[in-house]
Image: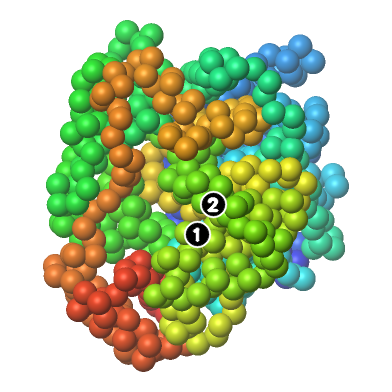
């Protein structure tokens, strides 16, 4: 796990000092080592920078940038099967100087070209420069576990693991995209490829970006899409066979992610996903695995359940209770580490559990992806019952535009209509209309009517995902959540929270072979009217008593909104005052202040709006105003 960055600059303004700055602002991603490469050619200045968190081959032989023939590489992430690929390359006549996966990626690219990515099992974002063709190749892993951003105009190309790279590039004009800002307030994140910054983009997962240094032109080339696997024929075996096959794939994925030359631990929330990962890894391990949990004694607390599961499985468990003082310490650091803002309070406990784990380990496994692959969200199960009701409507052929309109109603109608209109997906199943996607995501965001009052520029752009070619809208639910909230919210949150403490996070449930297999499982193998995540539960029940696990799904929760009205009220006074709200020029100051007043007097239903406003304002003050 590391941080990568670089540039190609026709104007020759960017230089080695720029690369040093990139290393400094991303030092938390790789405190063990740093390296830069700078060269001039007839076209301009080329630079690469890397900060290293040493995981494999801790020696200096793992230093990056790394060179071979005409290629230079900087890599962030892990290729878990690098030893198998290395053996293949040895048989092809290649030799190796280190025990790193970086050298394997570099020589795999030399041998297979861009097809090398088909060999990789892992999480990765890397850049390779070719001094012969004067091209730069960027690549991002299939699920999007590792981040990668880029900027390009007619004079320069810049890339990096975090937005700090672009915020610290003097030749880039830092302006906010009003459409992305609207989207952030409504959903709490910005859908790729956009970011909050104009002309700075996410390289979307499963893609290559190829840049021509001479023309400063680029092309995107996709190599993997989850939707392609939902279009394949469904798994024909029995439910029991599906459980066994899933367990074998998950076991292999977990085993791969234990490969490291440093201590490894597990985030154990006590839910089915993290309990399964822990159980599968501890069952045949003679040493006690280290597990970590955060509790919320003043909120919704599952730490006691997690501790009981850890005791049952026999792990070396550490639990810590999140307090107001922890939140007060962490919140001021959010704008720096979350330089791409995430409008969810769970960023706080995720940072806290990362800080806790870092005291004992350098790598921590989490269970992100289980809900998106196996149907863990309550809305999936609710959707079945709702769609059955919708199917009974005699005018099922009515224009979907009516239901789209209903879905956009603001309070007080939205709470009633919102959930029920999701069910129109069954009607749209045979029409394959994009409105279903728009409606589904809208119901998961704050009401448009509220956001329209808060912002000056109503540049709404409803988050969408293409579901063309799917034969069942049930599958669309999984594609939408995987390609939106997982990639652009959950994974960014975990990456920034873990890397804030120089901790490598690994996600066995996002192994691409598991993703591909789960996409081919019948919907009713994952969810029925009585249960969510059926396959995961069946695996867990093999190792943990059912009575220990069967309790309502909760997740992270802490009383942040109570604290913002009391001990943390000073944050609202500083960042959500009328004077502060007017500085960005993006907000309707009077309306925003009115919603803050409603919040403080316990009259606001959309409390998430206040948190998102606060997160944005803190980010704006840290990176735009004070810069």
* Relative horizontal placement of residue 97, taking residue 470 as reference (left or right): left
Of residues 407 and 559, the one drawn nearer to the viewer in this rendering = 407
Residue 588: percent from left, percent from top: 43, 88
Check disc 2 and report its element: helix, strand or loop: helix
Q: Residues within 10 Å of mark 1 (few under 14, many from 20)?
A: many
* Residue nearest the viewer, comparing 447 with 431: 431
Q: Are marks 1 and 2 in contact (CB under 8 Å)?
A: yes
Residue corresponding to mark 1: 420
Q: Quadrant of residue 319?
A: top left
Crowding near pointer 2: few (<14 within 10 Å), some, many (20+)?
some
* Residue at 64%, 34% in the rendered image: 519
**Disc 1 from disc 2: Cα separation:** 9 Å
Q: Quick check: can you spot residue 277?
A: no
Please provide percent x and percent y for residue 452: 49, 82
**Is 528 placed above or below 380 here?**
above
Q: Is residue 289 above or below residue 340?
A: above
Disc sitting over residue 389 in the figure:
2
- Residue beneath the point at 31% across and 22% down: 546
Residue at 78 percent of width and 15 percent of height: 93
């Amino acid at each position: 796990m590391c941080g990568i960055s670089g540039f190609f600059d026709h104007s020759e303004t960017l230089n080695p000092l720029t690369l040093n700055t990139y290393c400094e602002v991303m030092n938390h991603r790789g405190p063990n080592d740093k390296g830069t490469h700078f060269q001039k050619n007839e076209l301009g200045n080329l630079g690469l920078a890397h900060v290293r968190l040493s995981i494999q081959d801790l020696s200096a032989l793992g230093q990056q940038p790394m060179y071979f023939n005409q290629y230079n590489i900087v890599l962030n992430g892990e290729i878990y099967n690098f030893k198998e690929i290395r053996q293949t390359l040895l048989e092809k006549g290649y030799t190796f100087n280190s025990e790193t996966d970086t050298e394997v990626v570099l020589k795999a690219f030399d041998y297979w070209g861009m097809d090398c990515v088909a060999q990789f099992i892992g999480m990765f974002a890397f850049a390779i420069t070719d001094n012969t063709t004067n091209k730069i190749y960027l690549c991002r892993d299939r699920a999007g576990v590792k981040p990668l951003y880029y900027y390009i105009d007619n004079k320069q190309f810049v890339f990096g693991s975090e937005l700090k790279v672009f915020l610290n590039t003097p030749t880039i004009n830092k302006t906010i995209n009003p459409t992305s800002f609207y989207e952030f307030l409504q959903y709490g994140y910005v859908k790729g490829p956009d970011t909050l910054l104009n002309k700075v983009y996410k390289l979307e997962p499963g893609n290559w970006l190829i840049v021509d240094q001479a023309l400063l032109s680029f092309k995107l080339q996709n190599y993997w899409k989850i939707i392609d696997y939902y279009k394949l024929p469904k798994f024909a075996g029995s439910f029991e066979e599906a459980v066994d096959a899933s367990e074998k794939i998950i076991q292999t994925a977990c085993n791969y992610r234990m490969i490291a030359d440093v201590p490894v631990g597990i985030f154990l929330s006590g839910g089915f996903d993290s309990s399964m990962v822990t159980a599968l890894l501890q069952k045949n391990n003679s040493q006690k695995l280290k597990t970590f949990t955060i509790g919320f004694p003043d909120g919704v607390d599952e730490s006691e359940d997690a501790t009981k599961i850890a005791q049952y499985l026999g792990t070396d468990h550490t639990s810590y209770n999140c307090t107001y003082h922890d939140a007060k310490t962490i919140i001021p650091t959010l704008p720096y580490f979350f330089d791409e803002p995430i409008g969810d309070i769970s960023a706080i406990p995720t940072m806290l559990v990362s800080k806790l784990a870092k005291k004992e380990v350098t790598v921590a496994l989490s269970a992100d992806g289980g809900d998106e692959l196996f149907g863990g969200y309550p809305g999936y199960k609710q959707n079945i019952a709702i769609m059955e009701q919708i199917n009974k409507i005699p005018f099922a052929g009515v224009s979907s535009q009516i239901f789209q309109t209903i879905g956009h109603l603001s309070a007080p109608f939205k709470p009633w209509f919102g959930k029920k209109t999701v069910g129109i997906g069954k009607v749209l199943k045979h029409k394959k209309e994009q409105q279903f996607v728009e409606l589904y995501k809208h119901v998961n965001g704050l009401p448009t009517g509220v956001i329209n009052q808060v912002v000056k520029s109503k540049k709404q752009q409803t988050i969408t995902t293409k579901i063309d070619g799917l034969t069942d809208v049930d599958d669309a639910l999984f594609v939408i959540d995987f390609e939106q909230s997982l990639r652009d919210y959950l994974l960014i949150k975990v990456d920034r929270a873990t890397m804030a403490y120089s901790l490598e996070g690994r996600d066995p449930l996002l192994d691409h072979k598991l993703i591909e297999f789960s996409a081919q499982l019948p919907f009713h193998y994952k969810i029925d009217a009585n249960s969510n995540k059926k396959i995961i539960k069946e695996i867990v029940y093999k190792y943990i008593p059912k009575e220990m696990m069967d309790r309502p799904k909760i997740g992270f929760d802490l009383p942040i909104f109570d604290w913002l009205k009391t001990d943390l009220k000073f944050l609202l006074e500083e960042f959500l005052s009328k004077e502060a709200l007017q500085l960005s020029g993006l907000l309707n100051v009077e309306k925003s202040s009115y919603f803050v007043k409603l919040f403080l007097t316990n009259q606001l239903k959309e409390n998430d709006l206040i948190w998102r406003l606060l997160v944005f304002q803190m980010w704006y003050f840290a990176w735009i105003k004070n810069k």
